[in-house]
Image: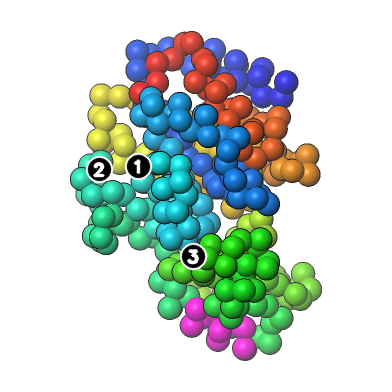
């Protein structure tokens, strides 16, 4: 079985300690939720086990705050979460110690903002698109019905996806040379393009990895006598920065049977099964290791 030997090697080589605090950083689409149905029932039991053991499940997604909040309610997850490819970290009030960090209080959250505000980003988007006459279409130019048709979301869910705060998903209909030109123009203006499952995403200088590093430090400051040990689960290229910042990177198999190619990382675990089934399988494999006591 793919991953078994690697898991055994990693755990056998690791220093055996009394207690580690396990953090689970996870993508949503194609990872914790099914790419097409957006269901997570195959991972429900594993999620329940993590909740019972008070092991944080930290969603780290390209989705908006409104979308992630919906899934947090459905999954009953009380922990922090990261939205729009690392653009902002939402931490519930009176939850964790924010030592030396700048944050804004927004309702029930303390928010660490790493991304470019949507209004500013869209202004650059529109100007650059017009200047280069690029054949592209962003969420800001789509109706809720269009977003629903492209994603398979309900109209209500598509309205949540349209509530962007830091990024602009878009479709590109031009040549690869033109795409590289578009990338160069945005980079000159301090913006970057990442590739998601269905769309490209225009963002600021944020990525999932930067957000994960900040959250790991926050947990280390909050639990100074406990070693923090992080797992990351994702299936796409925009998950690479996150996977590069955890102790155990896990690439979830796609429905096509393939895995995202992740160059430059050391040891990587690849799930046998796709989507939430693969997610649950790898979580149970970690929890089943007898050499560690997780908190």
Residue 4 screen position, x and y as percent: 66, 19
| Gap between marks 1 and 3 measured at Cα | 20 Å
Residue 30 screen position, x and y as percent: 64, 46
Q: Is residue 128 magenta?
A: yes
Residue 228 screen position, x and y as percent: 37, 29
Evaluate if marks 2 and 3 touch, with contact meaning CB atoms under 8 Å apart.
no
Residue at 64% across, 74% down: 146
Residue 133: image quadrant is bottom right
Question: Is 292 positioned to the left or the right of 266 in the image?
Answer: left
Q: Which residue is mark 3?
A: 160
| Gap between marks 1 and 2 measured at Cα | 10 Å
Q: Which residue is mark 2?
A: 95
Residue 229 screen position, x and y as percent: 42, 28
Q: Which mark is residue 153?
A: none
Could you say whether the residue bearing mark 3 is in a helix, strand or loop?
A: helix
Could you say whether the residue bearing mark 2 is in a helix, strand or loop?
A: loop
Residue 88: image quadrant is bottom left
Could you say whether the residue bearing mark 1 is in a helix, strand or loop?
A: loop
Residue at 41% across, 54% down: 69
Evaluate if marks 1 and 2 touch, with contact meaning CB atoms under 8 Å apart.
yes
Residue 240 visible within the image: no
> In which quadrant of the rendered image does the N terminus lie?
top right
Q: Which mark is residue 78?
A: 1
- The foreground one among 151 and 224 is 151
Magenta residues, start to end: 122-130
- The foreground one among 184 and 278 is 278
Q: Closer to the camera: disc 2 or disc 3?
A: 3
Residue at 60% across, 15% down: 8
């Amino acid at each position: 079985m793919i991953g078994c030997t690697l898991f055994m090697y990693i755990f056998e080589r690791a220093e055996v300690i009394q207690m580690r605090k396990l953090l689970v950083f996870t993508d949503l689409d194609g990872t914790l939720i099914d790419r097409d149905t957006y269901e997570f029932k195959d991972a429900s039991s594993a999620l329940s086990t993590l909740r019972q053991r008070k092991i944080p499940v930290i969603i780290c997604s390209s989705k908006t705050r409104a979308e992630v909040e919906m899934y947090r309610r459905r999954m009953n997850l009380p922990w922090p979460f990261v939205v729009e490819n690392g653009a902002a970290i939402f931490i519930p009030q009176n939850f964790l110690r924010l030592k030396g960090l700048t944050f804004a209080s927004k309702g029930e959250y303390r928010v660490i903002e790493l991304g470019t505000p949507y209004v500013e980003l869209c202004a650059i988007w529109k100007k650059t698109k017009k200047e280069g006459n690029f054949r592209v279409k962003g969420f800001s130019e789509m109706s809720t019905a269009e977003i629903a048709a492209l994603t398979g979301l309900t109209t209500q869910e598509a309205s949540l996806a349209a509530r962007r705060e830091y990024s602009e998903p878009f479709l590109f209909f031009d040549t690869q040379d033109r795409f590289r030109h578009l990338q160069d123009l945005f980079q000159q203006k301090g913006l970057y393009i990442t590739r998601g499952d269905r769309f490209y995403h225009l963002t600021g200088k944020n990525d999932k990895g930067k957000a994960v590093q900040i959250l790991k430090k926050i947990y280390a400051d909050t639990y100074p006598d406990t070693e923090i040990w992080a797992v990351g689960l994702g299936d796409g290229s925009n998950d690479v920065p996150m996977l590069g910042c955890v102790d155990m990177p896990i690439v979830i198999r796609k429905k096509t049977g393939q895995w995202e190619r992740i160059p430059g990382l050391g040891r990587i675990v690849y799930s046998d099964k796709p989507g939430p089934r693969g997610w649950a399988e790898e979580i149970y494999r970690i929890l089943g290791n007898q050499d560690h006591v997780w908190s």
